[in-house]
Amino acid sequence: MKTLDVDCPRCGCGCDLQLEDDTNVVLLSCPSCSTPLVSYYGQTFQVEPSEFRYLRQRGGMREATGAVRVRQGAGVGTMQQAVLAPAVHAAGDPLLDHPVGADEILELHDELAACESIEDVLRFLG
């Protein structure tokens, strides 16, 4: 039985994937946040859902039998709360009352360029 260490780059969840076959490339979803992942020769990468579907549908892939043991969970609760926050506008409604002009884009670019850290950007946007 082969064991692969898989660490989700999105949420930080760590797990051991035990496979019955000697496999070096594995497609899986993170057990914590369901992010599509590829484990490729010991390295774990997040992939877009469309890439994940393409790789699963492509010929030459087969299902592997095994088990997953979560070593450490991630603090996903905060991220889920942020994602599930209610919207302040109805779906399909415009966010602004006017189209964004080139002057506004340049002004935003200059203001963001003046930020020295991600905290400054978040304060600016907040």
Image (cartoon, helix red, strand yellow):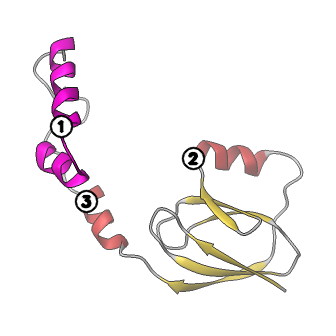
Q: Is residue 52 left or right of residue 76?
A: right
Residue pictured at 28% horizontal, 69% vertical: 78
Q: Position of residue 13 (x, y in %)?
A: 50, 75
Q: Is residue 111 above or below residue 57?
A: above
Q: Amino acid at mark 3?
A: Ala
**Whole-number angstrom distance, CA of label 2 to CA of label 1:** 32 Å
Residue 9 sits above or below residue 109 on the image: below
Nearer the N terminus, badge 3 or badge 2?
2
Front residue of this view, candidates 39 and 121 = 121
Mark 2 or 1 closer to N-term? 2
Coordinates of residue 81 in the picture (x, y in percent) = 26, 64
Query: Does dot 3 land on a helix, a strand or a loop?
Result: helix
The nearer-to-camera label among 2 and 1 is 1
Crowd class of label 3 (few under 14; some 14 to 19; many from 20; radius 10 Å) = few
| Precedes in sequence: disc 3 or disc 1 | 3
Residue segment shown in magenta = 102-126
Q: Quadrant of residue 24?
A: bottom right
Quadrant showing the N terminus:
bottom right
Query: Looking at the rendered structure, which numbered label has been put on residue 48?
Result: 2
Q: Residues within 10 Å of mark 2 (few under 14, many from 20)?
A: few
Give the spatial CA distance, label 3 vs label 1.
Answer: 26 Å
Circle 1 sits on which residue? 114
